[in-house]
Image: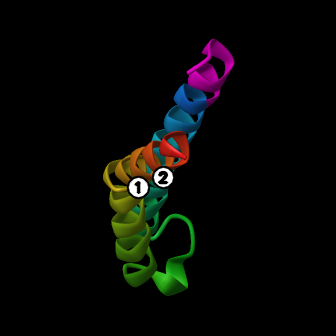
Amino acid sequence: MNEDKAKARFMMLNVVRFSGILFVFAGLANANGKLVPEAAPYLGIMLCLMGLIDFFGAPILLKKAWKKQDGQ
């Protein structure tokens, strides 16, 4: 694998994880009624779950996709 591809993948992993953290923080804020008070706490719980799935699950899926892509 060349260096440019490795750098791009590393940046993609960081962006995915950072977006997961942002979803969790937005969910926590909304669960406390700060962002969209009329949708609290349900929207907050959904955002937290999406953020956790994004933070922990998306890198695994990306790794599988990249492994499949490199194998071809």
Residue 29 placement: quadrant? bottom left
Badge 2 is on which residue? Answer: 65
Q: Does the magenta stretch include residue 5?
A: yes
Label 2 neighbour load within 10 Å: few <14, some 14-19, many 20+: few
Q: Can residue 32 be seen in this view?
A: no
The CA distance from mark 2 to mark 1 is 6 Å
Q: Nearest the camera: 26 or 32?
A: 26
Residue at 34% from the left image edge and 68% from the top image edge:
49
Left or right: 53 with respect to 39? left
**Quadrant in which the N terminus appears:** top right
Q: Do the residues labelled 2 and 1 touch (CB within 8 Å)?
A: yes
Q: Is residue 26 above or below residue 62?
A: below
Indicate how the structure is coloured in the image. Answer: rainbow
Q: What stretch is highlighted in magenta?
A: 1-8
Q: Where is residue 12 in the image (x, y as percent from the top left)?
A: 58, 37
Dominant secondary-structure state across the stretch colored magenta: helix
